Amino acid sequence: MTPTTQFRIPTATKDLFKDVCAYRNVSMSQVVINFIERYIAEQTRDPALRRHLSARETELRTGLVQDNRGTWVKPETLKKPEDNWRQFL
């Protein structure tokens, strides 16, 4: 079974959506899932978004992050913001 996701919808919108789904004999969940899948398919045509998602997936899989040159490194090797004051000495 998939996990439950909650989000807020105006009451009038939800009631009308529920009525339309009942009239069409489809589940509200399946309609929402179809809308989400269609949105993902449309949005992932953007090459910049695909690169971002690919980089995010690499981060999650490897634990590495990209530095300012785009090289994959361990997060602890990056300068921390509190180290920036040293450049002004």
Image (cartoon, rainbow, N blue to C red):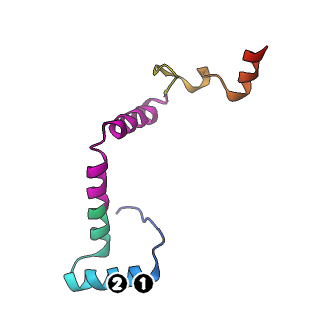
Residue 75 spot, x, y in % from top left:
57, 26
Please name the residue that numbered disc 1 is placed on.
12
Badge 1 element: helix
Q: Spatial distance from mark 2 to mark 1, Cα to Cα?
A: 6 Å
The reply to whether the magenta stretch includes residue 80 is no
Residue 7 spot, x, y in % from top left:
47, 68
The reply to whether the magenta stretch includes residue 52 is yes
**What are the residue bounds of the magenta stretch?**
36-64
Badge 2 element: helix
Q: Residue furthest front?
A: 88
Going 32% across and 60% down the picture, which residue do you hit?
A: 36
- Give the residue type at disc 2: Leu
Give the overall secondary structure of the magenta segment. helix
- For the C terminus, the image quarter is top right
Do labels 2 and 1 touch, CB within 8 Å?
yes
Q: Quadrant of residue 16?
A: bottom left
Pick whichever, 7 or 4, lies toward us.
Answer: 7
Residue 48 spot, x, y in % from top left:
36, 36
Q: Residue furthest top?
A: 89
- For the N terminus, the image quarter is bottom left
